[in-house]
Image (cartoon, coloured by chain):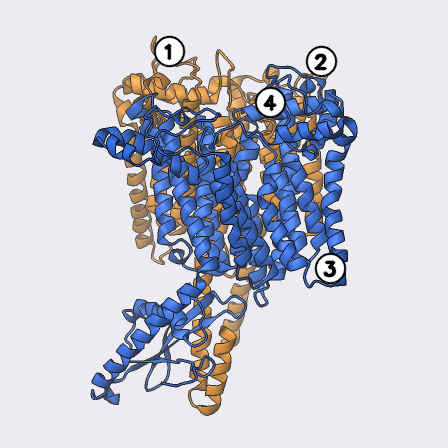
Chain colours: A orange, B blue
Amino acid sequence: MWKRRRSLHLEESEVNIKNTKLKSNDIQRLKSVIIEKIEAQNEVYGWIALIAAFLAIQAVVSTGNYSGYSNAPKFGDFEAQRHWMEITIHLPISQWYVNSTENDLSYWGIDYPPLTAYHSYIFGKISNALNPSWVELHKSRGHQTTNHLAFMRTTVIVTMLFLYAPALILTLRGFLPKNMNFYDKFVIGFAALFYPGLIYIDNGHFQYNHIALGLFIWTIYCFQKRKVLWGSFFFVLALNFKQMELYHSLPIFVYLLSLSCSSSPSITTKITKTICNISKLGIVVIFTFILLWLPFFQNIELFTQVLRRIFPFERGIFEDKVANFWCSLNVIYKLKTHLSTETLIQISLLFVLCSALPSLFILFKKPNDKNFRLSLTITSLSFFMFSYHVHEKTILQCAIPALFLLPDYYEVVTMLLDASSISMFGLCIKDEIPEILFMFLVYHIVTRILCSHRTPKLQLLKSVQIAISLAVCGLQLFGVPPKRYPYLFELLNAVFSFGIFALFWLYLNYIIISGFISQLQNAQQQQQQTSQKKKKVQ
Amino acid sequence: MLFRCYISTDFEVHRNWMAITHKEPLSKWYYNNVSQWTLDYPPFFAYFEKTLSFIAEAVDKDILTLQEEPFLTDSVLIFQRVSVVAVDLLFIAACAIAAEALINLNQWGKGSINIRRKFALFITLVFTPSLILLDNIHFQYNSMLYGILLLSFAAIFSQKYLLGALLFAILLNFKHIYLYYVPAFVIFYLFEYLPPFNFYSLSRMFGLGLAVALPVIFSFGPFFAAGDIEGIQQILSRLFPFKRGLTHSYWAPNFWALYNSFDYILYKALPIFKLKKLCEATKILKCSFKAPTYVLGVVEEYSHSVLPNITPIHTLVATLVFLVPLFFMRISTKRERLLFSTILSGYAFFFFGWHVHEKALLMIYIPMILLSFDNLKFLDTFILLSIITPVTQFPLIFTSVENLVKYSLTLSYLITLICLLRFVYRLPFSQIVNKTNLGFAITVSLLEIYKVLIHELIFKNTMDFLPLMLTSLICAIGVTVSYGQFFYIVFCEGIKINLAKRRCHKLEAKIHAQIKEEAQKKFDIKNVQFVAGADISAFPSQPDLAVVSLSVLKYDTLEVVYYADKVVRLNQLYIPEYLAVREAEPVVDFINEHKCRHQIDVLLIDGNGQYHSRSKKY
């Protein structure tokens, strides 16, 4: 079609030389506009298809077991979510977080912030309308019917499709380079959307992480579009859905602070503008907080009770075998026997802050998109590796910001994603769905095949990584551990994953620091050049 | 991944077959009736089960227990699920090969469009939701069989006719339902392979005979050796149980479903309107007014209450009548004949056959996928079928979590399909999904909502048969419509052309009269600011797709100020002298669409009379 137009145009140009230049420019421009239009439309359809496929995958994973299936008397996370629905609709708000005869906190008491409770309340009302026996007080404990299961699975799928997936796609699109071709965009979108860790935890194991993470991604999206106030609003919501979002709060705080600092030359306007910006943000944040916590302000005791539920420091530095620093260190040096809880908390806090500091400092100095993404991932990894009482599911908090690094460091990030999924394999075994490993593997293979720019060294590294992880998983699944160390293989997995996370953390730090230094050098050179020019002029 | 879905009886069926083939000597396979699920597939399938049983023995010996009661443990479950996934690999490979073969045969120019089509066809085939539902949830080995079918198609596409025949014969010995295709293959080889009739055709005939006979000998031979002619008779009696009813417990959406529901409506309606006497007056009708048994969901013979009973002979005659058109097809390529005839014979058997399973709709659907990627004319029919095929399978799977899966899978397949088609052809949405299909999609989704939510509210646990009946009724209407569409496209082109020509003549006369009237109007060139040109151009290799474009130029500087284009599907036929019939409509629509977006004073359209000229010029 275009060839024909071109040739027609050539004939014309021979006749009418005067207009040739103008017209050829025009046609070139139009051509690029049209191609862009087609590409954009293609992209939209591509994303829709991806989301549709996402739906299918979720549904398939949904048929698997959930955590604590037929595992009386405590059951698992699925029962926890159901139990919260039961509690929230039958008890008054003030009783939600308080231990009483009606609300036995040792049986899956609510330990997430209020937004989760409200969310449970809404779905509790819906399930009560559909079938009251699903959420009957006390009697419904350990309720297991397929209809109820289908309902719960649907609640996850719905929010995942309409809250999480669009946020992810929209935000990711903003971070993609403009001149990237359709295929590469599609591949990155695929790798981000089909990240198996989250699909497993939310659709398989059963939790609502995607809501907190989705809200967090909306935050990034708003920041990307320079709507800072909306962004902070969303972040407060995310924070109030799961306290784990604190992992992201430091970079976001620094980023906002740095953005609020006005760069006007005169000092007085600078200060007033900065204060004005900060106070605006402060009002939004505080107002949202107050709104969400309003029912719990009745008396101070209730408030502290809720806080105590949300931050349970008495639970120890790590629970099961987690791929973080403390658990790995524990192999050599038994922490719990040597140090008291107090000191452990202090040490872990110190470690986290120290490890996150360089990236935060650079983010403060140069608050651009890339540094923001990098430091989000770095800080959350620091938290994951060094902070107090980490759960293996918490790696999601690091993996999701890492998804936005896919456009820049595709291969390295997919390595992290693989490692993070496989570090949760112990959970899969507990949930009796080892077939999830198959999904992790397919994800690894597909992301690897689709990738169009490969570097041989990294490919080799990836093969080594996946081979070791598979071996470890195989041991976990079929191996019989020695009697002295019943958790040997779990520990092996944890330590190995920790190694990969630590390497990745170092690599990101290297990137952000070297980028910063080269920027500084450039700036210095420019300064020198300008000063030299000035001298010459003089 | 669908390991933990509900467990249908077919599990036990296949496990039992495995046990039979493992424990019993070959001659006893078709006599064994320890369990109620006797072996009723042809011998190759039995061999297949035998091979599986060797692996099963290595995994866990308990799997092969031969007993009357169903036997189910975790290892049985996992073993069987894994075996399906393993043979799925064959299906995936077959899809890739078939897609490659078909698209290579019908290249559309150069460039990426062929790769895009290949990719889309592959995805469409592999992720057919009905197959996933049937195999991975309900549990059967259909994928493998369709894989062999696709391989056979692929062999024929790449002109290895003998291989194609061989593969088809093997397939036939796996599952006898593929007898549906036999007329199609016979016709294909009769018209395309054997002629021209000369000395060489004899050798070809010999080769063909050999290709067909070999699998048969290999499959039935051992039984003949073991049990003489009786052994084969026993197999045949197991394969063709005519003792079952006209329709399955759940009616497959074919003509007889319509017939049954009409009968049922009459049975309910006649007493209300007091037409019993009228009914008895027409002697053909039965008017027995016994409650019909077919609504009870049993697999038995039954009789109708008002309309005359149907016997196997009736269905056979109807099927044969509808097979006759196979001889009168207008064919342009060999692959078209193959696909047309398979679809047509599939339709005939499915629509009028005795005791048809709803699964058999796949036998129309799979070739239809291939055909629609070969020829865009069938896109509408194809989409209609892709809506209906999964819906007919839905009643097979009824537990709540699996409900979620079946809906999600189907929805996601349909959306992906539309996106893929859009990606391949760059057609706008309205051109991909036409109004009929949209209507069907909405009806079907309403039906499913009713089934899941509303039915229980209204009837509680009574009237179990109603949703099933509604499903098969609606799907039957859909199948009928698709059958009609297909028939129309294949056979009625001539009528269409004549109609269009006549319309053209009338219009021409009208236009002449108008021109005479308007010729006097004056036209001032000074008022002209913008000149527009519009044209349409069809793809040389795919005449059903065309690009319309419109450019607006400023009159004085000839600067391009507006440009638009769009890919359209041409629904009308190409008639040598009447190009306008085919191309005018999209152009006019397109101009109307863009008229309001930019001012146009003069419109230039090239009628291109030179290449499509008539002897007499107007």
| In the displayed structure image, the side of residue B114 where residue B196 appears, left or right | right
- Judge whether residue A241 can be spotted in this image: no
User: Which of disc 4 and disc 3 is earlier in sequence?
Assistant: 4
The nearer-to-camera label among 3 and 1 is 3
Q: Circles 3 and 4: CB distance less than 8 Å?
A: no
User: Which of disc 1 and disc 2 is earlier in sequence?
Assistant: 1
The image's mark for residue B201 is: 3
Same chain letter for marks 1 and 4 = no
Query: Mark 2 = which residue?
Result: A483
Whether residue B245 is situated above or below residue B575 in the rendered picture? above
Query: Mark 4 = which residue?
Result: B37
> Relative to the observer, which residue lies in front, B274 or A468?
B274
Label 1 marks which chain's residue? A
The amino acid sitting under disc 3 is Ser
> Relative to the observer, which residue lies in front, B583 or B125?
B583
The amino acid sitting under disc 1 is Lys
Image coords of residue A191 (percent x, y): 55, 45
Label 4 marks which chain's residue? B
Image coords of residue A429 (percent x, y): 60, 24
Label 2 marks which chain's residue? A
> Relative to the observer, which residue lies in front, B605 or B296?
B296
